[in-house]
Image (cartoon, rainbow, N blue to C red):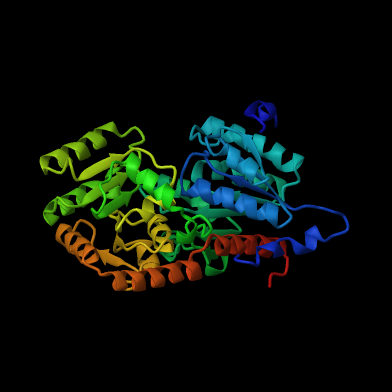
Amino acid sequence: MKQVDEYNNAGVADGSNKLFHAFSSDQSGLRPTVLQVLPALVQGGVERTTVEIASAVSDAGGHCIVVSAGGPMEHEISRAQAEHITLPVDSKNPLIMYANVFRLIKIIRDNNIDIVHARSRAPAWSAWLAAKRCGVPFVTTFHGVYSLGWGLKRRYNGVMTRGKKVIANSNFVAGHIRKNYGIPLERLRIIHRGVDLDRFNADRVQAQRVVALAKDWRLEDGLPVIMLPGRLTRWKGQSFFIEAIAALGRKDIRCLLVGSDQGRSNYRREVENLISANGLNEVVSIIENCTDMPAAYMLTDVVVSASMDPEAFGRIIPEAQALGRPVIATNHGGALETVIQGETGWLVPPGDIQALTNAIEGVLALDVDARKVLAQKAVANVREKFSKNAMCAKTLSVYDEILGKNVG
């Protein structure tokens, strides 16, 4: 790992191995190099996708460098046989952003970067200017939708549309981009977020992992478990979920809110007070952290995503479906693409307590055969449309397209 000081004084599924085929087989021995830039390497969808693409590039015979402000996932970059360089690209301070331009220029030139791929706005400004100065193709990924605000905010967001190719991680996000930024369709690519089907595979989750987690969380045998994963923040809908559980009126269930408050202590207290006010202290528990989400999904009878605002993609639902778990999500954003109503899960209006209550009741009433049919359809849907391998192959295909390689 290289640190910022070094640069402070600067002025598909199975098709992914086709990446850079012409380059990697060239007698010159050149290895195309991709530079990915994101704010930091903490736990999250942007970070996970960055690691997965870094690994795919390495597996395909290329080289990947990741620039970020660092974080707990740095070691995963090394495991992906990629390189991490620490720079303060998480900063929105204009002076630091401007200094980052020259730091990134040095990185691009020192490492013969072939493509610069930006995944967030603040680092994208520095990366775009550096790529432009060096004459290197620039690519962006919209991992979510940005509030538009006034003209200055729209201009700030607009850097994400400056890529030679602009990747949207769902049809919902692509629609947002087209509506608000009007980029031509030939520059837009839709690549859904991918689920790691090796990790989220029911046959590979050992029973002892599930049992250990149930013991740690003090879950009684025989009681149905309903889980809402996601960081504790208002728009994720924990309050909506608690109200629905209260309306359900059952004490013979256990409900888990799995996710950190990430410093939102006031909201956490609000959620805890709502649990107490509804007499649900024995029913609803907050789990601060979980390092084994496949096991967590497997011990649940219902997985809920209650987001009040649209999810750009929403990884919780397809992860749970990949393990054959019944899911309920709110009917907007990416969930409209990952849930087939009544076949692989259920959709309810955001904030509609009675609709969520009814959906939970319906899932808990499913017999063994109905759950089996649902699981088969859910797993098949994720494997067909939302696999990590497909996401990687499509992204690498975009790189090939930009570099003028034949893909097929």
Query: Image height check: is 12 above or below 309?
Result: below
Left or right, 135 with reference to 355: right
Query: Image height check: is 103 above or below 210?
Result: above
Left or right, 259 with reference to 190: left
Q: Quadrant of the C terminus?
A: bottom right
Could you tell me which residue is drawn at 28 percent across and 67 percent down? 346
Residue 54 in view of the camera:
yes
Give the percent coordinates (x, y) of residue 58: 69, 52
Could you tell me which residue is drawn at 17 percent across and 54 percent down? 244
Residue 137 in view of the camera:
no
Give the percent coordinates (x, y) of residue 401: 67, 65
Task: Say which quarter of the image contains residue 397.
Answer: bottom right
Which residue is more in the foreground, 360 or 300? 300
Could you tell me which residue is drawn at 66 percent across and 60 percent down? 399
Give the percent coordinates (x, y) of residue 31: 77, 52
Task: Say which quarter of the image contains residue 22.
Answer: bottom right
Q: How many marks?
A: 0
Give the percent coordinates (x, y) of residue 106: 71, 37
Which residue is more in the foreground, 399 or 202? 202
Q: Quadrant of the N terminus?
A: top right
Query: Image height check: is 132 above or below 270?
Result: below
